[in-house]
Amino acid sequence: MSTHSDIRETDAKIGALGQTARELLDAAGGVEAVRRNTKRVLASVRMLELNICDLYELEHNQ
């Protein structure tokens, strides 16, 4: 099972990934392919955020 510090580290990395994707989206300008694909990345980041919440709850309910 993951430790609390592993979960926090993973959460921080997911947060950094999301921040980078948001920065990329802002920098994409009129390049529609970059905007579309970055939005897909952000949707995946959101799913990762939800997964981390689930993992944290699972760890604390045992």
Image (cartoon, helix red, strand yellow):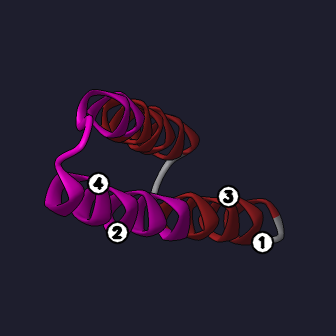
Give the mark toward the camera: 4 or 1: 4
3D distance between C-alphas at marks 3 and 2: 25 Å
Give the mark toward the camera: 3 or 1: 3
Q: Is residue 1 visible?
A: no
Give the mark toward the camera: 2 or 1: 2
* Residue receiving disc 1: 62
- Is 25 part of what is drawn in magenta? yes
Q: Is residue 26 visible?
A: yes
- Specify the label residue 40 is tagged with: 2
* Residue receiving disc 3: 56
Say whether marks 2 and 4 touch (CB < 8 Å). Answer: no
3D distance between C-alphas at marks 4 and 3: 31 Å
Q: Quadrant of residue 59?
A: bottom right
Say whether marks 3 and 2 touch (CB < 8 Å). Answer: no
3D distance between C-alphas at marks 2 and 1: 34 Å
Could you tell which of marks 2 and 1 lies nearer the N-terminus?
Answer: 2
* Residue receiving disc 4: 35
Give the mark toward the camera: 2 or 4: 4
Could you tell which of marks 3 and 2 lies nearer the N-terminus?
Answer: 2
Element at label 4: helix
Amino acid beneath label 3: Tyr
- For image coordinates 37% across by 30% down, the residue present is 26
Amino acid beneath label 2: Arg
User: Of residues 1 and 9, which is closer to you in this image?
Assistant: 9
Residues in magenta?
22-47
